[in-house]
Each structure stands twice: as C-alpha cells, then as structure tokens.
Image (cartoon, grey):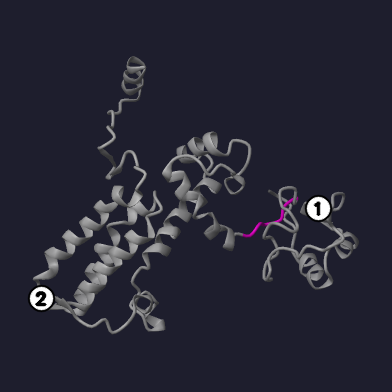
Amino acid sequence: MEDKMKEILNFLGVPEIKEYEKYLGLPAIMGKIKKESLNFIKERVWAKLQGWKEKILSQSGKEILLKAVVQAIPTFAMSCFKLPVGLCKEIEMQIRKFWWGECGGQSKIHWKSWEVLCQLKLEGGMGFKYLVRFNEAMLAKQVWKLQTEQTSLLYKVYNTKYFPTSSMFEAKSKKGSFAWQSILKARHVIEKGMLWRVSDGSKIWVFHDNWIPECFPTKAPHTQDIEDDLNVCSLIDQTTNEWNEQMIDQKIAPFMAHRIKAIPLCRTA
C-alpha cells in the first residue's frame, strides 16, 4: 500500500499531506468537530482586528477595512465548506465590537442590530456581509459550476463519485466528504431562482420543475385527476413543434394554461 501511494505521488508530482497539515490554507482532513477544525479563521480575524485596535480610524476607515480585508478572510474557506453557524456568529461579534469601538476595555453601545447593518445602504444599513448567507452564496456558485461546467475537473470528480447517472440537482448521496455535504446544503439557493428554458421539453417535469416564466408559482399546480408527473414534451406537438393547446387545456388549470401557451419554444437545445 505504501509503495502504491509513493508511485501515485511520483506520477502526479504532488506532496503527501498529513492529517494535521493544511492544503491551500484549509485543513486537509476535517475532524468530527468542524468548529475546532475551522477555528483558525476566527483567530486570523481577531489578529487582524487587534493590529488595528490602537490606531485612530474614522468610521469610514473602519468600514473600508472591515469590508475589504476582514470580511474577505473567510471567503476562500466559505467557497469550499459550510462553516458552523456558531463560528460565523463569533466572527460577526468580533466585527461588531470593532465597529462600535471600546472605551476603557468595555464595548460601547451597539446602536443598531447586526441585521440592520447588513442591509443595503439604500435601506438604511451599512452593507456588511451576513456571513451565514454569504457562505451559502459562495457554495451556491460551486453548485452552479457543477451544473454548467461539465468539462471542468471539479465536475468530473464529483460526477464520477456522487451523481454518475443523474444531474447535480438529482444527486441522492448525502454521504461523502465535508466539501460535498457543504455543497448539497446550498442547492436550494440555486433551485429557488433556477428556471428551465423549454427546448424539446424531454427533461422538464410539468408539476415538479420551475419552467414557467413571469409567473408564480413557476411550476404548474398539480391537479388531482393526474396522479403522475408529466414531461413538458407531452404538451408539445412533435410534428409541428408547437404547443398542443388541446392537451394543455386538458392537463393544466385554466389560469396557468394561457401562460404556458405564451412561452416561445426554442427550436435548438
């Protein structure tokens, strides 16, 4: 086994990473207690804030430093792992204390809640990042890459291991690496805003998928007289490549049928 490992390392030209070591700044192996494995992020934030603590900074200066430097520290880790909520809250607490300042070793009054400070400036906030949601957004980018960039190495590795016969959104396996589990927790972010564009309709489910634009809900409501889901292709006349209006009126509720008939069919995939 040892010889085989050395042979692979020599072939790939990469070093062997021990359990206690880091690769690209992240733990090579995650322990059972994820917060302990990722606690170094909070320590880096604390060290950065301590270095600024004694300097005289205006609120504008604090804002720039917090947004451009401190809140950028966990970005790479957040694009790979779902950070524990408790860890995100502790980092935000450090940022809040620095923002409002201290006097005699005691924190000053926090005049606004963190939720307000995270709102856009147009809405009365300061535009700070709400780390839990930002973490989900960073992982959602990985979900989108796995769905759209099928020639990438990332897709080839995960596709082979976790969803070899389906798409990213149909993957059932919740076991696997911490990175994979983290990505799965962000699928809902993409699913909420994702909308199918109708081509031949063979891969779109009428009552399950989001595919009807400028409408809410974006999927057709399920009717009681139809037990199983249908493919959108069943609503298209395959000889003319036009909507089968009679079939639509039979299967779809009237208030939604006219929306579907207005969707232009794409003649190319």
Tell me the quarter of the picture where residue 3 sits: top left
Near-viewer residue (166 or 98): 98
Q: Position of residue 200 (x, y in %)?
A: 75, 50
Q: Residue at x 31, y 56 (%)?
A: 74
Q: Tell me the element at label 2.
A: loop
Sooner in the amino-acid sequence: mark 1 or mark 2: 2
Structural crowding at the residue carrying mark 1, measured as other residues with C-alpha within 10 Å and reported as few (<14), some (14–19) or many (≥20): few
Near-viewer residue (204 or 133): 133
On-image quarter of the N terminus: top left
Q: CA distance from mark 1 to mark 2?
A: 67 Å
Q: Which residue is mark 2?
A: 56
In the rendered image, the vertical position of residue 29 relative to residue 186, given as above or below: above
Q: Position of residue 82 (x, y in %)?
A: 41, 53
Q: Amino acid at mark 1?
A: Asp
Position of 43 compared to 122: left or right?
left
The boundaries of the magenta stretch are: 195-200
